[in-house]
């Protein structure tokens, strides 16, 4: 694992897993996490595919039953399909964010009613989700992107991400859930 000092510290996730379904709720509890801020595109659903799969609905239901508060924070433009998705998942939603801008993460924290040290940010991008979450002092979980389709600017940033990711262990610090 990369040293937690210097500029790379802000680009280093607290842990890295394959998907949201590999996040261990006990890992969250051990860190006193109360709120979860999640990215949308390529984290929860494929890019611009805002249909709610049963597995995703069940995962959010389990988060809520376990007492976690949730909000989706996305750079996507407002759309009825995104609002419908958030409604089906029974979660708050912030659209049109300009991650990693700190003010949007702070707004998410206000909606959750949590402090950064009790909040986790989940996303598939280092330069938006991980950087923004680390800037405000949250735990950060980097997941592998769901699909290959994405915004052209994101594709460029993926090249820079490869350089940063080459300095990390493959996946570490956040064991998967028991089956």
Image (cartoon, rainbow, N blue to C red):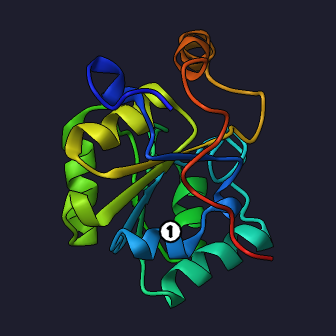
Name which quarter of the figure residue 118 lies in.
bottom left
Residue at horizontal 74 percent and vertical 42 percent from the top: 146
Residue at horizontal 50 percent and vertical 68 percent from the top: 27
Residue closest to the eye, 35 or 170: 170
Residue 175 visible from this viewpoint: yes
Residue 99 visible from this viewpoint: no
Farthest bottom residue in view: 65
Q: Is residue 101 left or right of residue 22?
A: left
Residue at horizontal 27 percent and vertical 47 percent from the top: 105
Q: Is residue 84 above or below residue 79?
A: below
Q: Is residue 88 left or right of residue 73?
A: right
Residue closest to the eye, 16 or 152: 16
Give the residue pinned by disc 1.
27
Q: Is residue 173 left or right of residue 48?
A: left
Q: Is residue 161 above or below residue 114?
A: above
Q: Is residue 52 above or below residue 40?
A: below
Residue 121 at x, y percent in the picture = 41, 52
Residue 46 at x, y percent in the picture = 73, 43
Q: Is residue 105 above or below residue 100?
A: below
Q: Quadrant of the C terminus?
A: bottom right
Residue at horizontal 21 percent and vertical 54 percent from the top: 107
């Amino acid at each position: 694992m990369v040293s937690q000092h210097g500029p790379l510290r802000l680009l280093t996730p607290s842990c890295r897993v394959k998907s949201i379904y590999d996040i261990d709720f006990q890992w969250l509890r051990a860190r006193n996490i109360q709120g979860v801020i999640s990215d949308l595109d390529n984290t929860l659903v494929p890019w611009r595919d805002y249909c709610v799969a049963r597995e995703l609905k069940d995962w959010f239901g389990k988060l809520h039953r376990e007492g976690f508060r949730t909000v989706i924070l996305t750079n996507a433009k407002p759309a009825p399909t995104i609002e419908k998705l958030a409604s089906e998942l029974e979660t708050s939603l912030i659209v049109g964010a300009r991650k990693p801008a700190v003010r949007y993460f702070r707004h998410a924290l206000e909606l959750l009613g949590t402090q950064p040290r009790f909040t986790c940010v989940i996303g598939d991008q280092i330069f938006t989700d991980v950087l923004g979450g680390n800037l405000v002092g949250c735990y950060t979980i980097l997941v592998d992107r769901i699909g290959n389709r994405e915004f052209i600017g994101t594709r460029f940033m993926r090249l820079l991400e490869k350089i940063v990711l080459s300095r990390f262990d493959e996946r570490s610090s956040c064991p998967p859930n028991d089956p």
